[in-house]
């Protein structure tokens, strides 16, 4: 696909009014090695390159306790994505799917999610592995792994930690 606005065979777009029904607050910016969509992975991997979640200073205190988790869920705004496709042909192979049956970044509300491996936190920057978004992507939220409802247990007295 040469242009963001071109449709593939069997794809279908709809006419939409400008979005105005919600306000999101970006909490920072994501720094990744990818500057072009063609270079960006389709899915992140925990052994992928380190990326940074650079939080705005007002949110630095909100990171307290996050270091107790190994895996985080990161939510981000796919600001360069189309928002008008209801049917997509993601691989240009003639197969078409409804947008909600895909994990495509092209969605009515282009919110990306990734389960990432926490590498470290330093001065309002969270270093992770496992992202799949472009450099400069707006950061929406960070949550502990949805399967680990509580932080790692503190070490028992008398045991050594790493």
Image: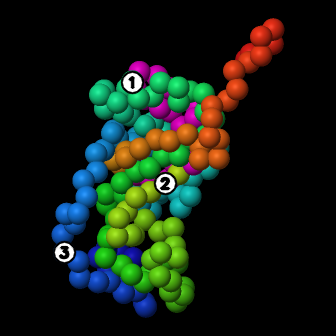
Residue 88: horizontal and vertical position, in percent?
44, 81
- Element class at badge 2: strand
Whether label 1 touches label 2, CB < 8 Å? no
| 47 in relation to 54, above or below | below
| 64 in relation to 101, above or below | above
- Element class at badge 3: loop
Badge 3 crowding class, 10 Å Cα cut-off, few under 14, some 14 to 19, many 20 or more, is few
Q: Quick one: quadrant of the N terminus?
A: bottom left
| C-alpha separation, residue under disc 1 versus residue under disc 2 | 23 Å
> Which of 41/21 is in front?
21
Majority SS type along the magenta span: strand
Outermost residue, right side: 158
Please check the rendered image and state whether residue 17 is part of the magenta-colored stretch, yes or no.
no
The residue shown at (37%, 45%) is 139
Residue at the spot of label 2: 113
Horizontally, residue 154 falls left or right of residue 94, namely: right
Residue 45: horizontal and vertical position, in percent?
61, 50
Q: Quick one: quadrant of the C terminus?
A: top right
- The residue range painted magenta reads 115-135
| Circle 1 or circle 2, nearest the eye | 1
For the question of whether residue 132 can be seen, the reply is yes
| C-alpha separation, residue under disc 2 versus residue under disc 3 | 25 Å
Residue 17: which disc? 3
Residue at the spot of label 1: 61
Horizontally, residue 82 falls left or right of residue 132, namely: left
């Amino acid at each position: 696909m040469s242009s963001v606005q071109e449709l593939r065979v069997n794809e279908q777009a709809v006419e939409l009014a400008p979005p105005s029904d919600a306000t999101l607050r970006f909490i920072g910016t994501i720094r990744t090695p990818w500057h072009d969509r063609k270079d960006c992975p389709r899915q992140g991997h925990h052994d992928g390159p380190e990326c940074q979640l650079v939080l705005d200073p007002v949110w630095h205190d909100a990171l307290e306790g996050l270091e107790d988790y190994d895996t985080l869920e990161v939510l981000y705004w796919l600001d360069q994505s189309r928002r008008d496709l209801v049917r997509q042909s993601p691989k240009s192979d003639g197969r078409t799917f409804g947008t909600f049956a895909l994990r495509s970044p092209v969605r009515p509300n282009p919110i990306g999610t990734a389960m990432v491996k926490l590498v470290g936190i330093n001065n309002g920057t969270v270093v992770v592995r496992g992202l799949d978004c472009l450099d400069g992507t707006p950061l929406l939220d960070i949550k502990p792994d949805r399967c680990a409802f509580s932080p790692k247990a503190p070490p028992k007295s008398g045991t050594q930690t790493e």
